Image (spheres, helix red, strand yellow):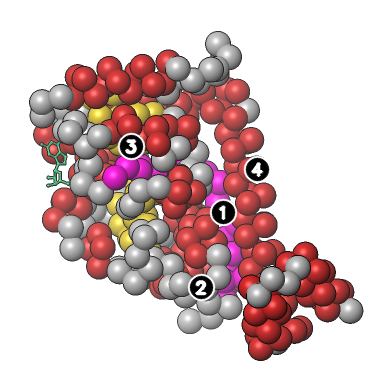
Amino acid sequence: MQVGELVERVRGGDRRALARTISLVENAAPQLREITAGLAPAAGRARITGLTGPPGVGKSTSTSALVAALRARGETAAVLAVDPSSPFTGGALLGDRVRMQEHATDPGVYIRSMASRGHLGGLSWATPHALRVLDAAGFDHVLVETVGVGQAEVDIAAHADTTVVLAAPGMGDGVQAGKAGVLEIADILAVNKADREGAQAAVRDLRQMVAQVDRAPEEWKPPVVAMSAAKGEGVDDLLKRLDDHAAHLRATGELERRRRARARREIEAIAMAALVERLADVRGHAALDALAGEVAAGGDPYAAADSVLAALEG
Ligand code: GDP
């Protein structure tokens, strides 16, 4: 299929074209440059929501429940599950999950997992590409579910308009959220498994942690909601908070600021990837390795970088 036709089909929401294009993203295929140019004018309409939290907290269950709530309102949704910790798990990640099966035949829902195949830039490069594809396909919502904890999770969350951080009772939630810097990225905190003991304490702890952060009165204060995704309880409340946050983003100009910050990071990621490739082209991998050997043995890394940059300019 020609790139032009693929782009047209993606813009029309064709599933096979979507699947194929996201595989191209995973593999950092050279056609992406042209595909991206074709999709960019159609993107920017979807609301992008990130859901993150430690494994087992209920991200998939919550995502599925949210999708159901959105569909009940007649809105469409695409789900992208990304796994920063394991580059090779690929497409099986979500496809196998029974929880998502209820949406499998719904034409208003598209579900896909993505791994980075270890190429340069990894998921920080691939995620914005995949989000653009789903956005341009015309979904009202794109939900990005990230697996794993720590910095990778924080990085991935930076691709969303709104980030929901999930916690659950008995998972060291508050502490974990605070430690990994995850609290800072939360626009909404959701304590899932509220049917379990300790949920109210977790809500209280998280509210306290939120209250300790300095913010101006007009700034968004992340609400802490309790829900039981498995039972479908509290999901409407989460959806309402998501709507509130979306309205806040639009009213304050924060949406534009966030999207610009993302665009800037994307430009930098593309430029960095291109730069590193050109470095290897100009100097050759062997020469770079030799330089690395010198620096590792006590050489001056700045001088080495200078010589590499000089070769680029020359
Ligand atoms: P993920 O790894 O964060 O995506 O978590 P999953 O959505 O796969 O859920 C992990 C486990 O928690 C599964 O066994 C779910 O059935 C269970 N679970 C999810 N939500 C709830 C809930 O609200 N209450 C209870 N008790 N269990 C839940």
Numbered circle sitting on residue 260: 4
Q: Is residue 171 left or right of residue 308?
A: left
- The Cα–Cα distance between marks 4 and 2, rounded to whole angstroms, is 25 Å
User: Looking at the image, can residue 64 be seen?
Assistant: no
**Ligand 1 in which quarter:** top left
What residue appears at the point 82 percent right and 74 percent down from the top-left corner? Answer: 307
**Labels 2 and 1 touching (C-beta < 8 A):** no
Tell me residue 209's x, y (percent).
Answer: 39, 21
Find numbered disc 3 in the image and state the secondary structure of the residue it sits on. helix
Which residue does the image show at 59% across and 30% down from the upper left? 254
The magenta-colored residue range is 31-54
Mark 4 residue element:
helix
Give the residue type at disc 2: His
Give residue 193's quadrant in the image: top left
Q: Give the amino acid type for the residue marked by disc 4 in the picture.
A: Arg
Residue behind mark 3: 176
Q: Nearer the viewer, mark 2 or mark 1?
A: 2
Mark 1 packing: few (<14 Cα in 10 Å), some, or many (20+)? Answer: some
Mark 1 or mark 3, which is nearer the start of the sequence? 1
Is residue 123 or residue 44 the one in the foreground?
123
Residue ID for mark 1: 42
Q: Quadrant of residue 120?
A: bottom right
Q: CA distance from mark 1 to mark 4?
A: 17 Å
What kind of element bears circle 2? loop
